[in-house]
Amino acid sequence: MPTQPQNGLIYRFGEYELDTRLHELRRAGHATRIEPQVFSVLAFLFAARDRVVLKDELLDGVWGHRYVAPTTLNSRIKAARQAVGDDGTAQGVIRTVHGIGFRIVADVAEHDGERSCATAECCLGPEPAPPAARPLEQHIRFCTADDGVQLAYATSGTGPPLVKPANWLTHLDYDWESPVWRHWLQALSTGHTLVRYDERGCGLSDRDAEDLSFDAWVRDLETVVDAAGLDRFPIFALSQGCAVAIAYAVRHPERVSRLVLYGGYSRGVMKRARTPEQVEEVTMVMQGIPLGWGYDNPAFRAFFAARFLPEGTAEQTKWFCDLQRITTTPATGARLLSTAATIDVTALAQLVRAPTLVLHATGDAVAAFNEGRRLAALIPGARFVPLESRNHVLLEHEPAWARFTDEVRRFLAEDADPVVPASRVTSESPVSSLLPPPPPRSAPRSRSRSR
């Protein structure tokens, strides 16, 4: 039976040790009886403890190409939890990432299993190896929009708040472990408390929301910042989230201290299409999503991955393809893309009064570079930074990522400029039809709950 290759390491967590050299689980120095498959499951999960292990990956790693019923995997996970003093409710060692897989969340220290160890006290003596540094954590909560839709939002890091509006296709849990988004979330959580959320229809937010309009997106941002108890804060927005950030900043100039807009646009693809051929291309893509995703066509999902990550590795491309499948249904994905395609905040962008930094990749195939330049030109006083990259989602090891993080860090560290007085958009305003009516301010909701 194929199993995770034995690496000779001993993983220590709490009073337990998982010895992959001796194929032994010990508690307080005493061996604990454990079935071989259960041990293999534990060994596989601990070897990959820095990320989420997909269910299919775990099945392949432990059982190879043999068919295994879902009940078998569930029973082995249950037995593994029992063996290490965990359970399905507490999940202090093995955490279930619903719909995706499993992750080790205990504090783990490892040492070389080849080290001579004559007694159990040697491994559990007064001078143990220092524990591994605790990874950055996120805390997921829920709030309810004005139409009853439940929105999942997460906070991570420490320091002053930084709010990120949702972009197309997110999943708070999956993105947290993703090689596509992990470095983004870590960077944005450094020196700030990052607040982000899954847009309605996606991820951990309600999947069956009826209203997927742009107005609903703006109201959802209002709901999340109120639930988080925020008063004044900078916003970092990406892609379609830039238009949401602009609309919110115009409605609430007193609450937005700064805007950072990356890979954004003022007009969706249908609004900027100028020829029948361009309109036909956009229509074909949106109509093809339910068909391509509905039949679980990996080639169709790979088409989107290639546009977002043309220079991505095989692992990054696979994660992005899996995100499309995991985070929402094909029909909802098409509806969300249709809403983004008809965005037009051209008039609103000219009313922004917060200091603004606009960054855009020169070879971006999702939002053309000219759209980034146009957006910066529309916003009074906006600073524009071109980034040499072909990726819509910047990758960790490309030079553009280093410049991006440096520019954003310096911009957010600057003393907040005073907001230029600007009248709130009223019913007499020529752009009032672009904004949903502002709901009354409410105290942060106390019904939020943690995961």
Image (cartoon, rainbow, N blue to C red):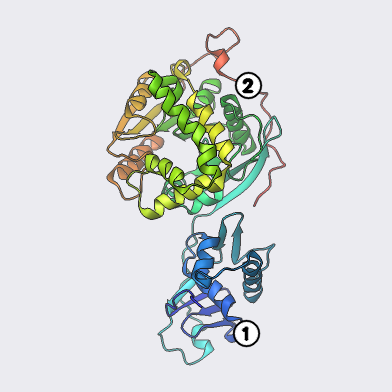
In the rendered structure, are the residues bearing label 2 and label 1 in contact, judged by CB atoms less than 8 Å apart?
Answer: no
Indicate which disc, 2 or 1, sits on the residue closer to the N terminus: 1
Residue 131, percent across and down? 48, 70
Residue type (three-letter) at the residue carrying disc 1: Arg
Residue 225, percent across and down? 59, 35
Residue type (three-letter) at the residue carrying disc 2: Pro
Whether residue 273 is visible to the viewer of this picture, yes or no, is no
Judge the density around disc 1: few (<14), some (14-19), many (≥20) Cα neighbours within 10 Å: few
Q: Is residue 115 above or below residue 293?
A: below
Tell me what residue is drawn at x 49 percent, y 87 percent.
Answer: 122
Residue 42 marker: none
Nearer to me, 146 or 162: 146
Tell me what residue is drawn at x 69 percent, y 62 percent.
Answer: 89
Which quadrant of the figure has residue 363?
top left
Residue highlighted by disc 2: 438
Question: Element at badge 1?
Answer: loop
Residue 33 marker: 1
Q: CA distance from mark 2 to mark 1?
A: 62 Å
Residue 332, percent across and down? 58, 36
Question: Element at badge 2?
Answer: loop
Tell me what residue is drawn at x 64 percent, y 76 percent.
Answer: 83
